[in-house]
Image (tube, rainbow, N blue to C red):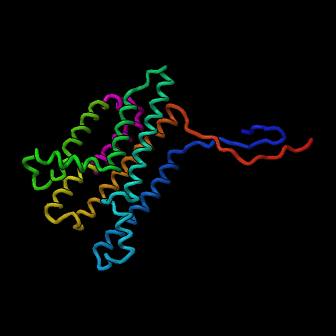
Amino acid sequence: MEKTLGSTKTASYIVSVNPGRIVKYVAVAITFLLLANIANIIAQNSSYYEVWYARILHKYFDFNGENNFPAFFSTLLMLSASLILFFIYKQTQIKLSGKGKKQWLVLSIVFFFLALDENLQIHETTTFHVRPYITNDYAGLLHWAWVVPYFLMFLAVAVYMFRFVLSLPTITRNLFFLSATIFVGGAVGLELFEGYFYKMYSIDHLYNQLLYCLEELMEMLGVTTFIYALLHYLNNYITPVSYVRKGAQLEKQAA
């Protein structure tokens, strides 16, 4: 569309947010981080682990590290999911005259907490409080004891959300289930084996490095799949997502 201002007119046009294109960009970022972490694993298990570039890779791209690029990217993904969920909640309120589905808001809060947890490592602190109450860690499977309360919280949210998710359009519902399976399978499922191998070989063993790599990758892919599901749902069932981009001002031609 065009908007005329005095003797000039400003060209502007609406750019639609394409879920598939956004996911492609995110996939490129994940691939870059994955390759950097694989390079880090190779360097850490070779004679070059003390070389300067190996130290840089380990500091900034280790999937099991904190305050680095993978941790920041994961936080950003979860925060993005939280904001999209809140936007859907507000849109449903508008369409339903203030009676928007509260499940969207609950999910927004959950993902906001996960973003905080990824950044502040709340679950690691939880481990120290829960571990004294676990009498049997099953050869290390429950060594990282945070998985117990977090899995129980996941079950509680899953039970609360189940009927709501079933009511969603088929593609949205299936993508929700797929993203949850990938994310929880990585975050909780692989964490069990990481505790097992930690007790056997220590945290820096190659087995654990590979497991941490796969765990973080599954978490990123799970959230990315979820974000795609949300954007697809928004565009097809709530309101198309777009923004107005202004072009250069054009001089009005004389008559």
Question: Is 33 inside the magenta-drawn segment?
Answer: no
Q: Which residue, as the protein is rendered here, is positioned at the far left?
A: 135
Q: Position of residue 79 (x, y in %)?
A: 42, 44
Left-right relation of 206 to 48:
left
Which one is in front, 55 or 37? 55
Left-right relation of 125 to 9:
left
- For the C terminus, the quadrant is top right
Q: Residue 177's quadrant in the figure?
A: top left
Q: Which residues are magenta?
A: 162-186
Rendered position, 161 above or below 37: above
Which one is in front, 24 or 34? 34
Q: Which residue, as the protein is rendered here, is positioned at the far bottom?
A: 47
Q: Which residue, as the protein is rendered here, is positioned at the far right?
A: 255
Question: Magenta region, mostly helix, strand or loop?
Answer: helix
For the point 50% across and 47% down, the residue is: 20
Left-right relation of 131 to 57:
left
Q: Position of residue 167 (x, y in %)?
A: 37, 28
Q: Residue 179's quadrant in the figure?
A: top left
Q: Position of residue 89 (x, y in %)?
A: 44, 30
For the point 40% across and 54% down, the residue is: 72
For the point 39% across and 31% down, the residue is: 105
